Image (cartoon, rainbow, N blue to C red):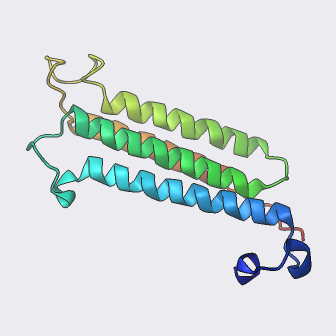
Amino acid sequence: MSEIASTKSPGQNGVSPQEIRKSTRVRLALILTVVGFVVFIIGTKPEWFKLDRSPVVGFVQIAVFLIGLAIISIGGYLGLNALWGSNERTILADIGQRLIATGYVIVVFSGMADVFGMGSQPRPDVPYFGPIQAAGVAIGEFVIAVGFLMLVPFHKHTP
């Protein structure tokens, strides 16, 4: 960490420009992921921020936590992708990338089921986030997590 923060040029302290770019991309992805987590928490628990205006989970609240999860997914993907550096990704990592996207699609369709007219509420103008939708969102989040695990580079570091 102190090598990167040093004022010396990369060649003098032994850190290559590729490593500096890689660590910068990982840091930016982590910042993006944390921002997404804050948006996700605002959507799931608005009362923590004194933003709760309704006793039920409504459309705006569902949309906010879906946007937060999208930002988390993008940040996580960018960070894990940056860890690969110049190494070629494996087939397992490519499958993981697609699982992240598939999991997010599952989450969106589960969370917005009433809005799309496929939910348990008979009236689509009153979105309801029930236990079946919560289970669908949890399954989608699990698929995203499996995708992230598949995207982790488990190769040996070569200096």
State which quadrant residue 133 falls in: top left
Left or right of residue 156: residue 143: left
**Residue 142 in view:** no
Image location of residue 139, percent across then percent down: 41, 41
Image location of residue 118, percent across then percent down: 28, 19
Residue found at x 61% / y 47% = 77
Left or right of residue 38: residue 4: right
Image location of residue 20, percent across then percent down: 77, 65
Residue found at x 90% / y 71% = 159
Please determine whether, in this image, residue 109 is positioned above or below residue 48.
above
**Residue 129 in view:** yes
**Which residue is situated farthest in the left direction here?**
55
Nearer the observer, 1 or 140: 1
Nearer the observer, 77 or 155: 77
Left or right of residue 21: residue 140: left
Image location of residue 29, percent across then percent down: 59, 55
Nearer the observer, 159 or 32: 32
Please determine whether, in this image, residue 16 is positioned above or below residue 62.
below
Residue found at x 71% / y 64% = 23
Nearer the observer, 128 or 52: 52
Quadrant location, the N terminus: bottom right
State which quadrant residue 101 falls in: top right
Please determine whether, in this image, residue 26 is positioned above or below residue 1.
above
Q: How many marks?
A: 0
Left or right of residue 14: residue 113: left
Residue found at x 65% / y 60% = 26
**Which residue is situated farthest in the front direction here?**
7
State which quadrant residue 95 falls in: top right
